[in-house]
Image: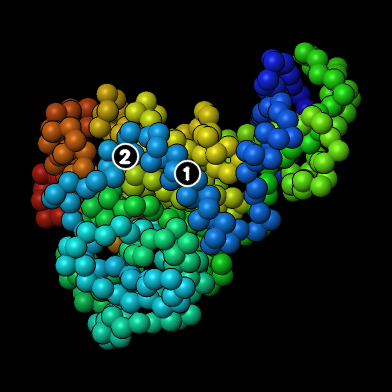
Amino acid sequence: MITYGHFDVEDDLFNLWVCLEGTGMKAAKLRLNITKTTREVYEENKIYIPAQHTAQSAAEAANRWIGVCDKNHPSCMARAAPPPDARMPTRLLDLGTGDSTTWRIIETQQDRVPYVALSHRWTENTPTLLQKNYDAYCDSQQDSILPQNYRDMLDICRAIQIRYIWIDSLCIIQDDNGADFRHEAPIMLHVYRYAFLTLMILWEFSDSTVFRDCRPSTIARPRPQSYKRTELTETDQESWYTYLKNLVISEAAVPSKDSMSNAHNYAFVRVENTGSYNFDVNNAPINKRAWVLQERSLSRRILCLGNEQLYWECDGQITAPLIANEVSPNGLPSITQRESLCSLSGTHSVRSWNSLLEEYTTRQLTYEEDRLVALSGVARAVAKLTGHTYFAGIWVESWMLDLLWEPDRARPESARAKPITMGVSSMVWIWT
């Protein structure tokens, strides 16, 4: 049921806000952003959203955002050139050149090359680097031995012409009692912070492709016969519904050039549903993992592969990060933003750090003893940017505030972080 609507008319821009009530909806509010345009401008600027993505179409979307990022985002470009003390990953997957369909593991010897980092959830089908297959994996292997979601990531890398990718399960030896992990864990700070791009698989796809049917929400259609400024209340339900129905066609329809060739006036109609970002990204299974909070905060730009569409996160302008999707490629307004290095080292860094910790303690860990390790990379990065001193979960400069915490009694005990046995009696402040 439509309970409220407001239609503002300006010379070139129409904004329509609709509040909805009903069951089965991800969001209770819908915003339609309607921009008057011409056929020529529309054809020049429209962004086609395919019915189903491929590695090539995902790469094209990524390249559009990367182009904007490189040109307009000083905060992003400040991290484009790693400092001399930045560490390269110890190992990378080399995907070859041209139309290669093979990969192999290489040891970088700290030679600097651009690479992509992968952020994902492990499943029972996750391939792993073991002592027994190490030598074999250093020789060329067919893509086909990997699960489909890994092959999708390799294809995206090739499509954006990045030859190397870092994947934790294949770049860290998994069966040596944790020896290689202990060596690699401190480098995680550098792996994600200085990657050319981070790819994030939001939902578990196991052995199926990450590319799903898209649900385009950007459409173009001939404008209605007339526009007028109007305020609508509950008494205008029928007229409001009729107007809205006439204005908005099926979200799944992207009109072709031929279907619009006889019309003279066009309007972009974009559905701005910020709730979809929170549902598809912030509440996705991957963002229940504690390690991913660090990976997401450290990454300078992320292409998120969601169930319904692609999302983009980067440091953006100095004043604010950029979070966007295919429907709103220039940015989504008024949403919960990730805690990036920019916010964690800025004017309100103490508040941002405490917000990060509150979120972090809700996350899941396979091994509870990783509770401090999985956040240490962010802490070290913030310490370097601010000059502050970090020690086991608190900052010396704000230690009194950092000790003012208590368990969230509203959360079930099973969802709380477990106490850590450190053998150090003084560390009683570590979050539980």
Query: Where 385 sits versus 155, above or below?
Result: above
Residue 169 marker: none
Q: Is residue 70 visible?
A: yes
Question: What SS does tag 1 mark?
Answer: helix
Query: Looking at this rendering, what residue extends furthest in the front direction?
Result: 40
Quarter of the picture containing the N terminus is top right
Q: Position of residue 262 (x, y in %)?
A: 86, 38
Q: Is residue 381 left or right of residue 290?
A: left
Q: Measuring 69% from the left and 40% from the top, which residue is drawn there?
A: 43
Q: Measuring 81% from the left and 15% from the top, which residue is drawn there?
A: 228
Say what amino acid the circle numbered 1 marks.
Trp
User: Disc 2 to disc 1, how far (Cα)?
Assistant: 13 Å
Q: Measuring 85% from the left and 20% from the top, which residue is drawn there?
A: 226
Residue 77 marker: 2
Q: Is residue 406 visible?
A: no
User: Disc 2 or 1, which lies upstream in sequence?
Assistant: 1
Q: Position of residue 19 (x, y in %)?
A: 70, 27
Q: Measuring 26% from the left and 85% from the top, which residue is drawn there?
A: 135
Q: Which residue is mark 1?
A: 65
Q: Quadrant of residue 275?
A: top right
